[in-house]
């Protein structure tokens, strides 16, 4: 991860009718990060995000994007450089999928062929075949498909920064899970700087390189998911993490491959994949009532052994 | 489907019974020796002769029989019979005229009586009912009404329907008729144009200055409560006064009576539906759609012209539909203060007790209203978001 700061907030506040929705926050988000802002509803997450693309202005403090103070930048030009995806998609119901995706490229006056190529590329990237989807209207899409189009639209202008406000919040758990995986897959190819807002701590732990926990307009903790789990800053973060679930949450952040031992003798009857999480491995052990699993790689070869004791020892951070 | 088709179709049965009843009980048509003398009525059999009358009744009875145990094939049969009923309708009139009015009597005229009108009315209702039952089976229900128009047109063109009272009234005033059409359309179009201009401007003003909303709607609602005749009348005095003191207004042809007060009153009535629909429609566009439009980097004008307005358009068009139908009706009333339009025939006819002249004004007014309804409904459907 490069250490160049892409987004910097310096003691930023925003008041609504005298009440601070965002209260003196300072934050540095490096290029290529997925920074997830998490917190209970009304704590100022959306307000923080909307300060970044100047949908609302700061009451005090400075925000710099790629070193430039946004107070000096034209709001519309700034927004065209940042992707923006929101809950319930906000797709334009009177335009086709292709027209929706091409909004920002059109605003940027790209030539027609480049826009068409871009729409094609993005639909394929999000697993929506161009022939089937380009000419559909938003009302003809499922919730998951519509949100994919929302993400494609946010990426269309090839922005350095992607702002996402609870984009998967209205989806069912299975669709949400697959879109989260999709986002991680895409990010591993495009390396944008992503600021992602959610109230779902599991979503935050799964997606984030670093998590910002907010409470009543302030930042309570800013750290990596593992550090957050191991060293919650206060009781609020602990309760957000869910006391009884912390062990499982941490286990879901770690891969079997990190803990497996060399294979000796005959491999056990039940197997787990090397890239699965420790949480999945534990679940398999509980289910099959066994104390050890055979670890297999992508091709199905037995590559290691995972005894239950390996879940208890080993590095924790 | 099974449930639907196994029970008899009561709507069809009722309509057929009513049609047969009015054919047998009322007069079918009438003949007047000239415009002044009272006419003499002809029952169904006397008017069309027994062969035609029996065939007509047989068709209706068959329709009823098919409706007792309707099946898809049965409905297609009904549709066929209804189409035939519609097609024979103008022909039966021509036949009546041919047999009852000697060609050398240039003053004699034929009138439609209850039987004839009810047959047309019930046949159209039957068509609507049966068409619903054949839902997916597209276009050919249109053949009946289109054929009716075509046959009527041909019979009028070839002169067979010439002695029809309505046409006698028309031919003695054909120049006035087209003048009235132009006048009527001109007033309605003008009212629609002006109220669209002012209405949208007012709606935008209300969006900017929400505190004006109450007073604007207060005034517009007040206009709607004034009866149209009273409003037309109220405008005569101030306009006469203004015109008498302003040569410019005189040059423009503005007087206390005529098109000027009519147009003013029409615009006053039209503003409410347009302002209300426009402001509601602009307001109703989903907040997250506007949020993402702004978040993508659209300028305020782009948000309005590319997102808010197109999404509001169907509801605005609905306002224009209401307005145009209302204006078409009110323009007829405006004849009382000397505005051109079909209303002049209606009021002349009422004054002279000539119902056919009333019809000559009323029928085109109704047709115009139906056309406006169809046009704006189609436009609203066309601009409905998200239908490819
Ligand atoms: N446009 C606004 N006007 C007034 N108050 C606002 C506005 N936007 C947000 N707020 C208030 O600011 C606080 C934080 O809101 P928000 O950032 O939307 O919270 P969330 O973390 O749920 O996204 C809330 O108390 C909300 O009521
Ligand atoms: Mg929010």
Image: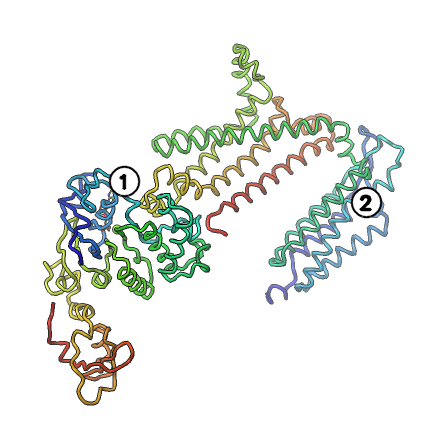
The residue singled out by tag 2 in the image is B43
On the image, the x and y values in percent for residue B173 come to 74, 27
Residue positioned 29% across, 50% down in the render: A159
Position of A291 with respect to B97 (left or right) is: left
Say which residue appears at 49% left-offset and 30% top-offset: B195
Mark 1 highlights which residue? A75
| Among the 4 quarters of the image, the one containing residue B61 | bottom right
Disc 1 residue crowd, few under 14, some 14–19, many 20+, Cα 10 Å: many
Q: Give the camera-side residue of B307 and B6.
A: B307
Residue lying at 34% horizontally and 41% vertically, measured from the top left: B298
Q: Quadrant of the N terminus of chain A?
A: bottom left
**Vertical order, B20 against A181 (above or below):** above
- Location of residue A57 with respect to B140 vertically, above or below: above
Subunit under mark 2: B
Name the secondary structure under disc 2: loop
Q: Is residue B115 visible?
A: no
Image coords of residue B53 (percent x, y):
82, 50
Where on the picture, by quarter, is residue A299? bottom left
Tag 1 secondary structure = helix
């Amino acid at each position: 991860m490069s250490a160049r700061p892409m987004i910097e907030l310096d003691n930023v506040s925003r008041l609504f009718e005298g009440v601070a929705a965002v209260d003196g926050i300072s934050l540095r988000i490096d290029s290529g990060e997925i920074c997830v802002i998490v917190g209970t509803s009304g704590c100022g997450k959306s307000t923080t995000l909307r300060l970044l693309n100047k949908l609302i202005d700061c009451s005090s403090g400075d925000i710099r994007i790629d070193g430039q103070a946004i107070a000096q930048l034209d709001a519309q030009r700034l927004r065209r450089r940042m992707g923006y995806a929101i809950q319930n998609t906000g797709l334009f119901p009177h335009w086709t999928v292709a027209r929706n995706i091409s909004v920002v490229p059109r605003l940027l006056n790209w030539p027609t062929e480049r826009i068409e190529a871009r729409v094609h590329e993005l639909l394929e990237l999000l697993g929506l075949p161009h022939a089937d989807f380009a000419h559909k209207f938003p009302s003809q899409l499922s919730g998951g498909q519509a949100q994919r189009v929302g993400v494609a639209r946010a990426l269309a202008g090839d922005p350095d920064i992607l702002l996402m406000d609870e984009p998967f919040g209205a989806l069912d758990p299975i669709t949400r899970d697959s879109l989260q995986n999709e986002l991680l897959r895409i990010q591993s190819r495009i390396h944008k700087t992503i600021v992602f807002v959610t109230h779902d701590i599991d979503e935050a732990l799964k997606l984030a390189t670093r998590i910002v926990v907010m409470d009543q307009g302030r930042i309570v903790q800013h750290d990596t998911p593992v550090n957050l789990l191991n060293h919650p800053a206060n009781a609020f973060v602990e309760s957000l993490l869910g006391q009884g679930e912390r062990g499982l949450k941490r286990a879901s952040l770690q891969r079997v491959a990190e803990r497996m031992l060399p294979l000796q003798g005959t491999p056990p009857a039940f197997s787990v994949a090397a890239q699965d999480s420790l949480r999945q491995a534990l679940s398999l052990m509980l289910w099959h009532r066994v104390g050890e699993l055979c670890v297999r790689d992508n091709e199905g070869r037995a590559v290691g052994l995972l005894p239950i004791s390996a879940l208890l020892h080993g590095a924790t951070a | 489907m099974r449930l639907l088709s196994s029970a008899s179709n009561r709507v069809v049965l009722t309509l057929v019974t009513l049609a047969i009843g009015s054919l047998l009980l009322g007069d079918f048509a009438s003949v007047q020796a000239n415009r002044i003398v009272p006419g003499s009525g002809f029952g169904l059999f006397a008017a069309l002769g027994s062969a035609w009358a029996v065939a007509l009744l047989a068709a209706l009875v068959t329709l009823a029989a098919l409706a007792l145990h309707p099946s898809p094939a049965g409905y297609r049969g009904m549709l066929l019979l209804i189409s035939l009923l519609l097609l024979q309708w103008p022909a039966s009139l021509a036949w009546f005229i041919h047999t009852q009015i000697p060609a050398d009597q240039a003053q004699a005229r034929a009138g439609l009586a209850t039987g004839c009108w009810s047959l047309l009315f019930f046949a159209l209702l039957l068509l609507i009912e049966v068409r619903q039952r054949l839902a997916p089976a597209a276009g050919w229900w249109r053949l009946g009404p289109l054929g009716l128009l075509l046959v009527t047109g041909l019979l009028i063109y070839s002169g067979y329907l010439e002695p029809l009272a309505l046409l006698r009234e028309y031919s003695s005033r054909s120049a006035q008729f087209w003048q009235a059409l132009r006048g009527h359309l001109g007033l309605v179009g003008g009212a629609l144009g002006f109220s669209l201009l002012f209405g949208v401007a007012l709606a935008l003003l209300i969006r900017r200055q929400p505190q004006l909303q109450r007073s604007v709607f207060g005034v517009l609602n007040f206009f709607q409560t004034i009866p149209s005749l009273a409003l037309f009348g109220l405008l005569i005095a101030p306009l006469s006064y203004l015109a008498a003191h302003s040569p410019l207004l005189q040059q423009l042809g503005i007087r206390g009576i005529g098109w000027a007060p009519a147009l003013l009153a029409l615009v006053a009535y039209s503003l409410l539906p347009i302002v209300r629909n426009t402001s509601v429609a602009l307001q109703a566009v989903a907040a997250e759609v506007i949020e993402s439009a702004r978040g993508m980097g659209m300028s305020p004008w782009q948000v309005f012209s590319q997102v808010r307005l197109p999404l509001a358009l169907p509801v605005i068009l609905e306002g224009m539909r209401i307005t145009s139908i209302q204006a078409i009706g009110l323009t007829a009333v405006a004849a009382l203060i000397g505005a051109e339009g079909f209303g002049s025939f209606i009021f002349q006819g009422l004054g002279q007790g000539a119902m056919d002249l009333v019809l000559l004004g009323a029928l085109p007014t109704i047709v115009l209203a139906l056309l406006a309804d169809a046009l704006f409904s189609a436009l609203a459907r066309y601009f409905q978001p998200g239908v490819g």
